[in-house]
Image (cartoon, helix red, strand yellow):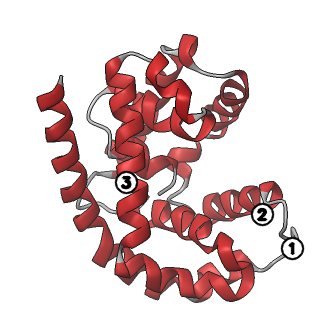
Amino acid sequence: MNYLAHSFLSFTDQQIVGQFLEDFIRNKERFSFPKEIQDGITLHRAIDTFTDSHPAIHEAKKIFSPLVRLYAGAFVDVSMDHFLANDFTLNSLQGWKNHSLRVYKALNENQEWLPENFKRMLAKMETEDWLYNYREDWGIKFSIQNVLNKAQYLEKDIPVFEAFLKNKDLLQECYNNFFPDLLEHTRGINALLQIDN
């Protein structure tokens, strides 16, 4: 899952911080953070493990695999954020805007825990309102291009966004079959984390 899903599947502001930190720290560093931030890191890992094993995600990867091979999962993650941002059964349009603002606030209030490269990304994320703008096709196009730009072994002009548009209905179906299961799974993981606290 990508940034919107990870933040939405957090139950506290501290967990939001941990969810974002996971991709920016080494494994041995996780224990240097407060317990609730560690819980966010644990949630992030549980979400990724569940996502990678879900049949609907395997189907979605088939759309991108011919173009980007092993990077297909990264583009599925970005795609799922688009459908989440447009899921008004989970949040209203204003609710998604409020969620985005909450995430930026939580991250900015915990800058002491953020590595410098993440702080630089956060400034862009907030200024350009990535989380809210995932709902737009142009927001996903921007995110897909970001993944292409960062991928060491991929050409930067691979028509991944075109594949997203062409297969939007199928990707929506994959989201519909997947996200309720992920939400239920994440609630279960969080309940276990609360028992440990």
Kind of residue indicated by mark 1: Asp
Tag of residue 183: none
Specify the quadrant that holds the C terminus: top left
The amino acid sitting under disc 2 is: Leu
Residue at 56% x, 10% y: name it.
112
Q: Residues within 10 Å of mark 3 (few under 14, many from 20)?
A: many
SS state under label 2: helix
Q: Is residue 121 visible?
A: yes
Residue that carries the numbered disc 1 in the rendered image: 157
Q: Are marks 1 and 2 in contact (CB under 8 Å)?
A: yes
Give neighbour class at mark 1: few <14, some 14-19, many 20+ (Cα, 10 Å): few
Near-viewer residue (122 or 53): 53
The residue that label 3 is drawn on is: 47
Taking 174 as reference, is 138 above or below it?
Answer: above
Residue picked out by circle 2: 148
Residue at horizontal 32%, vertical 23%? Answer: 36
Number of other residues with Cα within 10 Å of mark 2, as a class: few under 14, some 14 to 19, many 20 or more: many
Whole-number angstrom distance, CA of label 2 to CA of label 3: 23 Å
Element type at mark 3: helix
Residue 136, placed above or below residue 193: below
> Which tag, 2 or 3, sits closer to the chain's start?
3
Q: CA distance from mark 1 to mark 2?
A: 8 Å
